């Protein structure tokens, strides 16, 4: 069951990324994140039950990781085409493996190391191909933001495996979204106080509601998948990253982005590296 939950989560995430990119035309990164997360918190408020203080500290830590990943990811979307962002996001399972080696003493076999090499090569090509769509400085900034997003997202995935051993998925999801909402509200307040004159006001966009629904469902499926006793985080993370296929298609067909052939090659390399990691872990 956890495999199918992961597949469903991946499909929803792909549509979610396309909706986020479209929403950036009307609101800033922070407004999109804050409004969508606040709506998600409203959806999940029945599950805001009491828990030990130690559990809440764990969820606050997760909220910080997710906030960093989301903000840097959307900042990257402002600088790079969606098709480029989607290929770079596909590398996250590789970093889950790397963090597992560093933190938990896991060891890679030859096939897994080959997968790491292929993904790293694809990342390099992705960073170079992004220069076709943006100027060099903007492209470099976008790649840097995307690397931060991928690393913090991988750390959050590893932390999920730890906390979900003892906590219920909806408890984790509801409180985490509440804490993320508070963090983003503080960020926006600081931004407003720092530059009131150029502060961009919020503009309602129906896509924000769509974003909130998609991420609520995608995360719920993911948390329930990770919670299952026989679930493997490396496989779940790999399946979730296949959402880039949906995102890539959306960027090509809906947003009409350019240089699709070059980016398609990078995506194939990226997914091939992830497949090697998955096959080597079987």
Image (tube, rainbow, N blue to C red):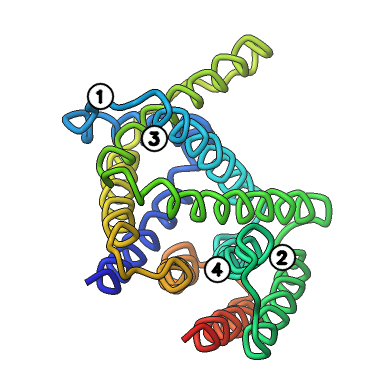
Q: Position of residue 22 (x, y in %)?
A: 44, 50
Q: In the visual, does 71 lie left or right of 36?
A: right
Residue 192 visible to the viewer: yes
Q: Residue at x 74, y 67 (%)?
A: 132
Q: Residue at x 60, y 64 (%)?
A: 100
Instruction: Name the mark nearer the viewer: 1 or 3.
Output: 1
Q: Which residue is mark 1?
A: 50
Which quadrant would residue 245 be assigned to in this image? Answer: bottom left
Q: Marks 4 and 2, Cα distance to the nearest angstrom?
A: 21 Å
Label located before the other in sequence (4 or 1): 1
Q: Position of residue 52 (x, y in %)?
A: 34, 26
Instruction: Name the mark nearer the viewer: 4 or 1.
Output: 1
Q: In the visual, does 55 lie left or right of 272?
A: left
Instruction: Name the mark nearer the viewer: 1 or 2.
Output: 1
Label located before the other in sequence (1 or 2): 1
Say above or below: 187 vs 90. Answer: above
Farthest residue to the left: give it: 46
Q: Residue 130, which numbered label?
A: 2
Q: In the visual, does 71 lie left or right of 129?
A: left
Q: Marks 3 and 4, Cα distance to the nearest angstrom?
A: 22 Å
Q: Marks 1 and 2, Cα distance to the nearest angstrom?
A: 46 Å
Q: Which residue is mark 4?
A: 93
């Amino acid at each position: 069951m956890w495999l199918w939950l992961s597949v469903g989560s991946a499909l929803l995430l792909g549509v979610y990324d396309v909706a986020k990119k479209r929403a950036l035309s009307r609101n800033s990164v922070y407004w999109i994140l804050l409004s969508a997360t606040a709506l998600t918190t409203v959806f999940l408020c029945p599950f805001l039950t009491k828990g030990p203080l130690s559990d809440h500290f764990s969820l606050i830590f997760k909220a910080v990781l997710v906030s960093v990943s989301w903000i840097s990811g959307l900042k990257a979307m402002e600088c790079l085409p969606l098709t480029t962002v989607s290929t770079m996001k596909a590398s996250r399972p590789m970093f889950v493996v790397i963090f597992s080696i560093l933190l938990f003493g896991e060891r890679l076999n030859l096939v897994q190391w080959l997968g790491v090499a292929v993904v790293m090569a694809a990342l390099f090509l992705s960073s170079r191909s992004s220069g076709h769509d943006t100027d060099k400085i903007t492209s470099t900034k976008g790649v840097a933001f995307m690397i931060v997003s991928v690393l913090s997202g991988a750390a959050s995935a590893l932390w999920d495996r730890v906390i979900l051993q003892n906590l219920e998925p909806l408890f984790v999801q509801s409180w985490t979204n509440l804490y993320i909402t508070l963090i983003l509200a503080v960020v926006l307040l600081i931004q407003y106080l720092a530059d009131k004159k150029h502060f961009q006001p919020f503009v309602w966009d129906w896509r924000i509601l769509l974003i909130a629904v998609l991420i609520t469902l995608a995360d719920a499926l993911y948390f329930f998948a990770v919670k299952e006793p026989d679930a493997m985080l490396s496989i779940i993370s790999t399946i979730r990253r296949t959402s880039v296929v949906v995102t890539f298609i959306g960027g090509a067909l809906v947003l009409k982005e350019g240089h699709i052939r070059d980016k398609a090659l990078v995506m194939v390399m990226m997914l091939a590296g992830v497949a090697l990691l998955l096959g080597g872990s079987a």
